[in-house]
Amino acid sequence: MKLYVPHVGHLEGLEELLAGSNDIYAVYMAGSPDHVGTGRTNLSAPKLEDIAIQTEYAHEKGVKLEVILNSSCMGGQHLSPEGYRMINWYFDKLNNIGIDSITVADPYLVEMLARDYEMEVVVSVLSFVDSPQKAEFYEQLGADTIVVDSAVNRHFDKLEAIKESTSCNLKLLVNEGCLYQCPFRYAHFNFFSHANGPGPKPNVVDDYYYYKCLSFRIRNPELILKSPWIRPEDIKEYKHITDTFKIGGRTHFVNWILNLVNAYANESYEGNLMDLLDCPKDLKDLFYISNKELEGALSQWKQCEKVCSRCGYCKRLADKVTQVYSTEGTEEFLIQLSCIGE
Amino acid sequence: MTLTEELLIARGELENNLRNLLGIPVFLIEMDGFALPCGCSGATINIRGLQVDDLEIFEEQILKYLNNAAENLEIEPSFIFARLIPGTSEVASLNIRMLCNRCYMDFARGSGKQPRPDIYILRFDRRT
């Protein structure tokens, strides 16, 4: 199995990460937000010299290094002559540094990279490749690898069709906790792309999309189970699709990342499912869902027609397996979800 | 008991009360005591899962819980409000605030429960 693992972006973090596991095939990190930006929050904004030092260090350890520039919205700047020159300059520098791969979300950048550079061109999960047709388009643009839209992680018919239709390598993001068929998905990533891109940066007090995402789950905890994450134990079900899996979580501590590397490398995890999910981070202090109690759920999801109003499986499962952290004084304990309000 | 211990206990108690009232696991994500340069002070409770409808329907009970929390934290509960995400049903935070004279005047000039799109007033004691 090839595990792509998030890296917080500074050398100290990389040293700690690579010292902690021999199961890491590649690490990925954001680039500088001054040029393209990324569709997710980052802890660091590494300069080119930082990326060069870290690439050399990763290579010494036999680990590949990928830079993520997956802004889903650049406001058209990349299509202007100035934007093109700036991005081309940045790609040149990254290429000269010797990074192994570069992940982008914009189709224009896919083609630009494929034509002019040797770096592996990876289509971001934020390109939302969820069909064989879209995969074929990206292949024609020159993509080497596609991170499949995690929304189809439990649609094996689509995964198999994508696999059949393209010669690109496929990568699956295993622990994104986003809502299944999230109504905020595009708007939220576009917002992040501006907040973590070259600017002008929006002055936002409250991240509406995030608050609403939390609110939906707090009021309907079964939505956590409907999110298309892949349990470590279920990796084996995907091996006919790909051997390459990506762990999300660039803003987490190194020990959190290593915990996930161990879980996915060993294909087993004893503990709270919420520990494994990249987002929403805050809910791990609210819900406890025993990962082991979800054994067998994938069999249902594999044959699920995704019409929740007819089925109700996830709701019943959530009622059974979800516990809620509660406090009495300063003591914390767990109560069953169904006991709330009784 | 230290201030932080009092905050921990008040956070848990308020969370339990709201959960029992609403029957959903509302989440008090953070409770902070604050002191501002203008002279205002109080507590802010960042909350997720609470909506404006809940405030409107259960205002009496929620206000009682907030008054109790204020009392336990030795904050005079003369101004209690929810901060909303404007134009939505989401409550971002609950706030218990002892207003300085300048800020008091700002709020005293307004009227109604929503003097601004982001504020829903649960209690405002006018000074005589």
Image (cartoon, coloured by chain):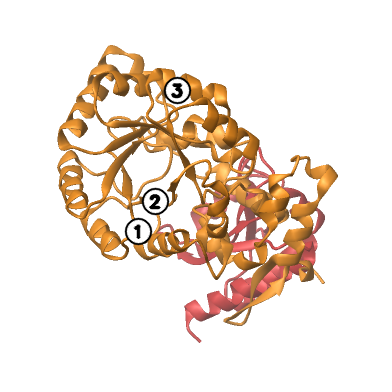
Q: Residue lying farthest top?
A: A81
The residue tagged 1 is A23
Circle 2 — which element?
Answer: strand
Q: Is residue A186 above or below residue A289?
A: above
**Residue B69 rendering spot, x and y as whole percentages:** 64, 72
> Residue A319 is drawn in which quadrant?
bottom right
Q: Amino acid at mark 1?
A: Asp
Which hue belongs to chain B? Answer: red
**The label number, if any, that marks residue A3 in the structure image:** 2
Q: Amino acid at mark 2?
A: Leu
The residue tagged 3 is A138
The residues tagged by marks 2 and 3 sit, at their Cα atoms, a distance apart of 23 Å
Number of callouts in the render? 3
Q: Are marks 1 and 3 on the same chain?
A: yes
**Residue B7 rendering spot, x and y as whole percentages:** 54, 74
Q: Give yes or no for contact between labels 2 and 3 (Cβ–Cβ under 8 Å).
A: no
In primary-sequence order, the first of circles 1 and 3 is 1
Closer to us: A53 or A24: A24
Label 1 packing within 10 angstroms: few (<14), some (14-19), many (20+): some
The residues tagged by marks 1 and 3 sit, at their Cα atoms, a distance apart of 29 Å
